[in-house]
Every structure is written in C-alpha cells, then in structure tokens.
Image (tube, rainbow, N blue to C red):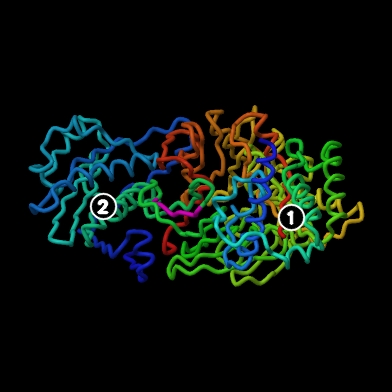
C-alpha cells in the first residue's frame, strides 16, 4: 500500500516522502516456501543483484548504490545469500531487464536461484524505478514493480522493493520499512533516537539534555513512550512522532519507569513505586491510572506483553534475585519461567508469541537468551563476547536487535533469532536499550 | 595549604548556596545539578557559574536558624562532610551494612542538629545490572537509608528519595573497586 506521511516533522524524522508503487504485470505466483531460518540446517537462498540500470544520464552513482543497498537488505534478512557481483557475466548497463532478455542458463550456472533486475530514471528531483524478481530455475518473473518518488528517497524505495521480494518468497512482508528507537549516550546526557532498522538516518526524539531511557513503540508506530528525568525524577512521557509533541503520562511520587504499550490499545504497563513498592500498573496513554497488574513485596519491572495482550512477562526479584515471570492479566496467576542463573532481566515477547528473549548473566557477563513462553526450552544466543543486553524482536520475529559491548563501547547489533548473522548497525558507540518498531502504518 | 583550602571551600560553598537558590527558580532541572562527589565541592563550580552575589543570603541562614558567623562556619564544615560521605551496598542488595549504619548515625546527628535542612537521598547502582531493574534497586537503597533515619526518629518530611539506577556512576572503571563505589546512597543538601 502506498502511504504518505503527512506531517513535516515525521517526514524529517524518517526521511520518507511519497513513494508510490505499482505492479508491472500480473506475475506468476511464487511458490511460497515454508522458511524457518532458526532451524539449524537452514540454507540461505542464493540471489543475484546486478547494479541497477540507469536510463537517463542523471544520478548514475545510484546504479551501484541501490544495488548494494538491496543486496545488504536481502543479506540482512537472513533468507538470502547475495552473490558476489564480480562473478557476473554481463555488463549491468547493457544487460536487458525483461524476462525475454534475461539469460537464465547463465544465472543458473552462477548458482543463483533468484535474480533481481532493476532500472531507474532520474529526472531532476524525481525518481522512477522499475524492478523485477526472476525465479532463475523456472525462468520466469515472480514480482514486477514500479516505484515513483523523489531522488532523495531512494533508500526507502529500495527498502520497499526488498520488502516485496521477501513477501513474494515467504508470504510475509519484510521489515525494511521499520525503525529502531534507542538511547544515545552523550557524556552525562542520554537522549532517545530513532534510526532505520539498519542504523541509518539517526534522528533525535528528545533534546532535553537530561536522562532519557526505555523507549517503547505504540502498536501503530506513531507514538514513542519513554522515561525522562527532565522534571527531576524518573517519569514516563509519550512523544507523538507525527506532531512532535511530548506529554507526561505517569508522574507519580517515586519512580515511574519501564513503559510497554499493550498491543492494539492505548494503554501502557509501567512500573510505579507510588504505593511504596515498585509494582506494575496499567495506565492509559492520556495518563489515567487504570489498575495494578503485578503486586508483591518485591521489585517488579520491565513488563512486556504477549502479542494478544492477555499475558505479561516481567522481572521480579521475589525469589531473591531477578528472574522472569509470566502473568495472566485477567486471572492474575503468575509463573516463573527462568530458573538458570541468578540475574535474568529485560524480557521481550516475540511477535509470534512463542518465545521470550531476555538478558541473562553468565560468569559475570550478560548474554542474550530466549525461552519458550511456557518456560519449556531455553536457547543461548550470545556467548560471552562483551555484555549483551536489551534484546528486542523485529516485527516478523526473525531477528533480534540488542546492545553489545563486544567491540568496546555499547553499540546496537542485530542477529537472526538463531544467534547467527550478527551485524553491528550503529557507529561511534554509546547506543543502548534498542526497541524495534512495529511495521509502520500498521502494514 | 590547609587553611587556604578551607577558605576556598568556604567561599565556594557560599557561592554555591547562592547559585543553588537561583537554580531553584529554573523550570528545567537537569539531573546533573547537585549530582556528583559532593554538591559542595569545587568540581561543581563550573556548572553553577561563578560571579553571582555571594552568600550574603540572610534569609537562607535565618531559615536554617544560623545567626552567628561561627554557627554558619560550623554548619558549612559539617554540611560538606554530610554530603561527602556515601553509604555503600553489596551487589544486588539494599540491605544496610554495619558501616553504612554508622555513617547514617553520623548523618542523623547532623540532621538533628540542623532540623531545617532539606535532603535528597540518591540511590545508585553499579553498571552490571540492567537499567530498569537498577532504577528500582536504586530507589530501594535510597528508601532503606531514609527508613533507617525515620526509625531513629527523624521526620521524613524534609527527606526526598531519587533513584538514578546505574545512570550516574561516580567511578567509571569496569572493575569491582569501581562497582563497589557506585553501589551507594548519596546525600545532597537542597538548602
């Protein structure tokens, strides 16, 4: 679906303008593959992405840049293995773009299962891109799309194409239009930033020169809750990313921390110590206190909702040290789900509902784990390279972003949910507490 | 040398008291203000800006009930010590240790002697935990200290707890010695 971001703030924020897309032709349905990239034996699908073909003399450098970005996206997904373009036989600027012009046997010999062939016309500020995904083995087109927009929005345009390709092959859209909110450390100041899923285009959401922590996305991606000390102690605020407005939603005596939007609603779980003990409450996004969800004599923090909004995972130290619990919100029954180690925190419920990722301390180091929501099975995903904290799922549940000190100062990293395919997405250090957005515009 | 230092500290203290008053009127309070090894130490000079009216703040002294120069000097000396001495905690614990209780007894004497002071008790943690859990743990540490004072008969009306979790370490090393210094409650005088 084409969508338009109306406000200037958001357009500035996200560097997105209008990107329209259309279908070139009714292609043959791709055979949907049941793909579970977390299975140990999963083989990435080899795909060829030659440089795009420029059809005007303008912006010729985009030919390579767009091809490289598309390759990077496809590689990022963990589904594809882009082939090295140095092995390609044809000059991308003279090679054809339609099925009749593609030499499928050549691509097959190179080992490609799929081929993306795209061309573009840049005229002044406007950009038109045509792209086709070919099934090399079957020798036919799977997806054909036309995108129109502004030259400066070539990145979102390529991300959109990458989403379509993932959609065609898996039946589920990719996450290349998503964002990651995080905390940027600047000396003694911490601000909330939002960047593209790959760490590009970082934009500040807060500019308070204070301490801002714990960003949390609303289900439609239009609002970001966070904690700030800008008024003295820790309170929960919500930033409206469309208007750029910020409002207080929980500023009770004591600490007001750890916001988590209940999926599909305008309510947030937060930890408040207004009653003397840090317990988890439900508040409305307009700041109304609705109910106490978790109450004990212990520390209760870091709520994360099941995708259906019926259960809550959180951290409690009622057993003497921090462990992860799951509570049924309507019935109130709670159940501890982590038993190994004595410091398990930062739970993040997967968008498919089956797993809860968390950070657990092993030998003095934080590592990323995931546990079945019923506590049934635990997998360790990182293994003691620096401290690895604050896991957060991509909206398709295939990837996890987290912060890691494995290369010195804290930076954001992304890995596949089987622990492979690690890549660092932020530079310069000082990034922590990532929170992956939902798909934008509820797509 | 010591005499010079003493004098410097006193002058700084007066400047800071004055500046602190002015800062109260500001709408936005950044968390840096008043945080650090000692709010009354020279290190905070830069942030508050020198050159304002010096500590001829009779209203403040009257509020504290300190009328003579000697009383004020003594207060300043004791205030510095009050703010400079933190209490320390074990890892993932908010239980008051025996040394911490002795320091709190000391603070109790100060608070009883100067019942008009307003105090912020800051709870801090080392960096090893996770931010949100540490915010709750830091509050527990601050509350444990306040509770101790309350149990000893102090009114908590003039006491206020703030948790900074692991966000405001005093020691920036990544070793047990630094961690131990960061697991603390810190006391700041607000008047």
Write down the residue under mark 1. Answer: A278
Residue B31, percent across and down? 60, 55
Residue A352, percent across and down? 54, 50
Q: Earlier in the sequence, mark 1 or mark 2?
A: 2
Say which residue appears at 49% left-offset and 31% top-offset. Answer: A406
The Cα atoms of the two marked residues, 1 and 2, are separated by: 52 Å
Is A77 situated left or right of A98 in this image? Answer: right
Q: Main secondary structure of the magenta part?
A: strand
Assign the C terminus of chain A to one quadrant of the image.
bottom left
Q: Is residue A306 visible?
A: yes
Asked if the magenta segment contains residue A194, the reply would be yes
Mark 1 on the same chain as mark 2: yes
Q: Chain of mark 1?
A: A
Is A247 situated left or right of B135 in this image? Answer: left
Q: Is residue A420 above or below residue A318?
A: above
Residue A395, percent across and down? 47, 52
Snapshot quadrant of residue B15: bottom right
């Amino acid at each position: 679906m084409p969508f338009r971001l109306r406000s200037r703030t958001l357009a500035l924020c996200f560097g997105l303008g209008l990107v329209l897309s259309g279908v070139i032709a009714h292609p043959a349905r791709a055979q949907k593959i049941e793909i579970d990239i977390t299975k140990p034996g999963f083989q990435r699908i080899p795909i060829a992405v030659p440089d795009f073909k420029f059809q005007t003399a303008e912006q010729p450098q985009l030919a390579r840049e767009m091809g490289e970005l598309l390759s990077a996206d496809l590689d990022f997904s963990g589904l594809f293995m882009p082939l090295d373009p140095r092995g390609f036989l044809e000059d991308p600027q003279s090679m054809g773009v339609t099925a009749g012009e593609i030499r499928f046997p050549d691509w097959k010999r190179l080992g490609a299962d799929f081929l993306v062939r795209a061309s573009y016309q840049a005229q002044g500020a406007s950009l038109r891109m045509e792209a086709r995904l070919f099934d090399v083995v079957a020798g036919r087109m799977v997806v054909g799309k036309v995108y129109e927009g502004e030259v400066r929005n070539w990145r979102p345009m390529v991300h959109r194409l990458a989403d379509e390709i993932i959609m065609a092959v898996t039946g589920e859209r990719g996450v290349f239009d998503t964002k990651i909110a995080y905390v940027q450390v600047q000396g003694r100041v911490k601000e909330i930033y939002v960047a593209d899923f790959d760490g590009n285009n970082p934009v500040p959401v807060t500019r308070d020169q204070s301490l801002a922590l714990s960003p949390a996305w609303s289900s439609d991606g239009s609002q970001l809750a966070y904690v700030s000390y800008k008024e003295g102690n820790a309170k929960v605020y919500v930033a409206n990313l469309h208007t750029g407005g910020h409002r207080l939603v929980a500023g009770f005596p004591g600490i007001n921390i750890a916001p988590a939007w209940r999926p599909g609603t305008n309510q947030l779980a937060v930890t408040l110590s207004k009653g003397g003990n840090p317990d988890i409450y439900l508040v409305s996004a307009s700041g109304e206190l609705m109910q106490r969800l978790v109450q004990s004599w212990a520390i209760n923090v870091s709520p994360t909702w099941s995708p259906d909004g019926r259960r809550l995972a959180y951290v409690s130290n009622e057993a003497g040290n921090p462990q992860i619990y799951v509570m049924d919100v309507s019935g109130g029954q709670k159940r501890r789900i982590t038993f190994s180690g004595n410091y398990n925190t930062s739970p993040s419920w997967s968008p498919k509902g089956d797993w809860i990722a968390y950070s657990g301390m092993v030998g003095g180091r934080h590592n990323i784990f995931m546990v079945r929501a019923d506590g049934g099975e635990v997998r360790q995903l990182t293994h003691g390279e620096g401290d690895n904290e604050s896991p957060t799922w991509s909206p398709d549940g295939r990837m996890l972003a987290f912060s890691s000190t494995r290369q010195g100062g804290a930076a954001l990293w992304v890995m596949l949910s089987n622990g492979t395919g690690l890549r660092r997405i932020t530079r310069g250090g000082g990034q922590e507490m990532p929170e992956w957005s939902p798909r934008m515009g509820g797509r | 040398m010591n005499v010079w230092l003493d004098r410097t500290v006193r002058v700084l203290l007066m400047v800071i008291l004055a500046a602190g008053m002015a800062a109260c009127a500001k709408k936005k309070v950044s968390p840096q203000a008043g945080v650090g090894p000692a709010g009354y130490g020279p290190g905070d000079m830069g942030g508050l800006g020198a050159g304002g009216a010096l500590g001829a703040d009779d209203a403040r002294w009257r509020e504290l009930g300190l009328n003579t120069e000697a009383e004020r000097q003594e207060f300043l000396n004791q205030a510095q010590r009050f703010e400079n001495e933190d209490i320390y905690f074990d890892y993932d614990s908010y239980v008051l240790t025996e040394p911490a209780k002795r320091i709190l007894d000391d603070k109790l004497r100060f608070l009883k002697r100067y019942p008009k002071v307003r105090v912020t008790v800051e709870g801090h943690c080392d960096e090893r935990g996770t931010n949100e859990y540490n915010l709750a743990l830091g509050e527990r540490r601050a509350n444990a200290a306040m509770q101790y004072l309350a149990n000893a008969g102090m009114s908590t009306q003039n006491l206020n707890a703030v948790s900074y979790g692991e966000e405001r370490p005093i020691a920036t090393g990544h070793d047990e010695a630094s961690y131990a210094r960061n697991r603390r409650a810190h006391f700041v005088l607000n008047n």
